[in-house]
Amino acid sequence: MKNYEWFDAARFGMFIHWGVYSMAARYTWVKSHEKMTDEEYDRYVRHFEPDLFQPKVWASLARRAGMRYVVFTSKHHDGFCMFDSKYTDYKYKQKDLLREVIEAFRAEGMRIGVYYSLPDWHHPGYPHDKRHPQRDIPGVGNAALYREYLHNQVREILTNYGKIDLMWFDGSYPETGYIWDMPRLSAMVRELQEDILISRLPGYEDFSTPEQTIPQQGLFNADGTPQHWEGCQVLHGEWCYIRDKHWKTVPELIQMLVRHTSRGGNLLLNVGPTSRGALDAHTVSLLNGLGDWMEWNGRAIHNCCGAPAEFPEPEGCRYTWNAAKKTLYCHFFCWPDRRIDLPNLAGKVDYAQLLCDGSEILFKENLDGNINGPAVPPVGSLRLALPVSSPENCPVPVIELFMKE
Ligand code: GLC
């Protein structure tokens, strides 16, 4: 039995891209983009000194933002390990960074996910494929050698750190898929951690992971049943810390979270700590902004999914739905004038309130067309009477509609 229960209820997780590439502060793929040799890239390895590394601070910010799980980069494509592997010296040697991250997030009650890159631009067995920094120099590598290394490291991660809830592989392309031996790799993962969810191992993954895009209508299997999915998104245009960036805003991020939940998906929102291990002030303020909103509106996200199809969303709004509590949440991306008509909800709602302050929202309903007058709601719809201006300090206001039994 795959453990989707926590995953679907969580809806919001923190992705952390952190490694020696954070020092370049240009892009995660700096070694490949700039075709750096190992010797050139080594300046980062030599000078990496995360003296401000405080995973407890990351974890408490994530918790307060309403996040329920973390996915941490144990090794990115550059091959540098942020965990203590006995199979390589190409790692941070002073402490086991992965262990400290896991312990800090676990202490906050969060589920634990580990990102592990399948490609490795440092291991001599890894072929010079078209994304490799040394792609201009032929190199077929030694797939068997690298495969053993990769399997050994994944075994370490899934053996040495207690319960891991999610294994997030990355970087499998059709032309490199032969390297990993996916049937054996996935079997080992499930054997070592029986409840685990696997991501991005083509053919063996448990959910889909759209990246920097949000499916308009959610994701469905061929038979029409909804898929489990998780969109991974960035705060600015890159995964790792970069110095020059254009940020998304708190209202955009809240809307992003609602757009995932309302289509039955999770948002894995990325942060990129600085090379010294700190979250920069702007990231902290965005997380706090999300936390402020989640504190008052979190119940419209956690344990929620999209609304039943019989309730189409009014323009400018997204619905989320708590099926166990039969409660519908209407999220306003722009605030309407005075009133809004919600199709097909006449006769179905017991009570309505603004979620942020729990204040009553009065409504009228037109059940069968027998109300007369110039301004009646369309037949079948429920008309909410709204305050003239949207609630203060609430970038995305939510109205909570308790349905009749
Ligand atoms: C893409 C990027 C990779 C990043 C990943 C996160 O695959 O190439 O660098 O880690 O997205 O989802």
Image (tube, rainbow, N blue to C red):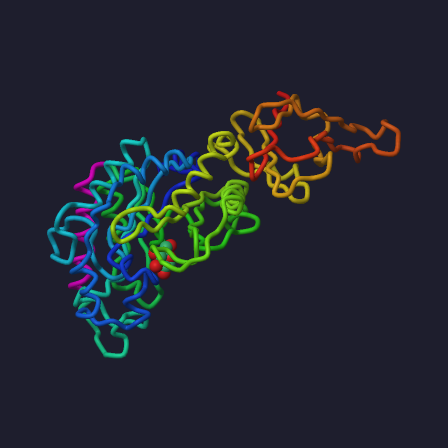
Q: Nearer the viewer, residue 384 or 166?
A: 384
The vertical placement of 363 against 89, above or below, is above
Quarter of the image with the N terminus in it = top left
- Foreground: 400 or 304? 400
Q: Is residue 316 rendered magenta in the image?
A: no
Above or below residue 265? Residue 131 is below
Q: Residue furthest bottom?
A: 137
- 254 versus 79 height, above or below: above
Image position, residue 158 (x, y; %): 21, 44
At x 70%, y 39%, the residue is: 336
Position of residue 372 measured from the top left corner of the image (x, y, whole percent): 88, 29
- Left/right of residue 343 with respect to residue 20 in the rendered view: right
Going 49% across and 54% down the picture, which residue do you hit?
Answer: 213
Q: Residue furthest right?
A: 373
The residue located at (15%, 46%) in the rendering is 95
Apparent side of residue 233 relative to residue 152 in the rendered image (left or right)? right
Total residue callouts: 0
Name the residue at 16% across, 52% down.
92
User: Is most of the magenta stretch helix, strand or loop?
Assistant: helix
* Side of 102 where 252 appears, left or right: right
Between residue 11 and residue 347, name the one nearer to us.
11
Q: Which residues are magenta?
A: 144-162
Magenta stretch contains residue 154:
yes
Residue 202 visible? The answer is no
Q: Position of residue 260 (x, y in %)?
A: 50, 44
| 47 sits left or right of 355 in the view | left
Ligand 1 resides in the quarter of the picture at bottom left
